[in-house]
Amino acid sequence: MANRSTIKIRSKRFADYTLVRTLIAHSMETGKRKNSDSGEPIPAHFIQTLTLTHNGKRLSECQMGFGIAKNPFFSFKIKQANAGDKITISWQDNLGLSDSKDHIIQ
């Protein structure tokens, strides 16, 4: 896990649901690009698992591959969320790196 979080989380409550948006700073390398200087392939480095929890209950676990863009953006709609509830977003990549961040719904 990095010293500075790689995850930004925002939420907005609506009448029927709460919208949770997250942006993750990650290179998401496919392993197919080549270094422009040496011509050597850049090793694959991508998020494999993204997890969303609401008050400690897992709502979603996404399994991903290398086809996701750099610095991926995700959004989720949660029907039973209230002000003060805790949202946690976490990820783990193919190199074993990970990050997690909590967010309190306003």
Image (cartoon, helix red, strand yellow):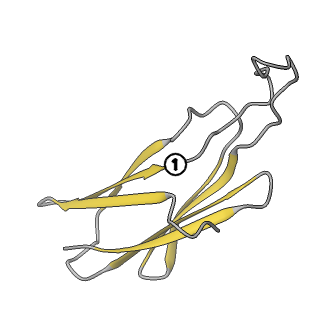
* Residue at horizontal 60 percent and vertical 34 percent from the top: 68
Q: Quadrant of residue 84?
A: bottom left
Instruction: Give the residue type at disc 1.
Output: Ala
User: Which residue, as the protein is rendered here, is positioned at the far front?
Assistant: 37
Residue under pointer 1: 25
Quadrant of the frame with the N terminus: bottom right
The image shows residue 45, relative to residue 16, as above or below, that is above
x%, y% of residue 11? 26, 61
Q: Is residue 63 left or right of residue 85?
A: right
Q: Mark 1: which secondary structure?
A: loop
* Horizontal side of residue 103 vs 90, given as left or right: left
Q: Is residue 17 visible?
A: no
Residue 103, position in %: x, y?
A: 35, 73
Q: Residue at x 70, y 34 (%)?
A: 29
Asked whether 19 or 16 is in front, the reply is: 19
Q: Nearer the viewer, residue 42 or 28?
A: 42
Quarter of the image with the C terminus in it: bottom left
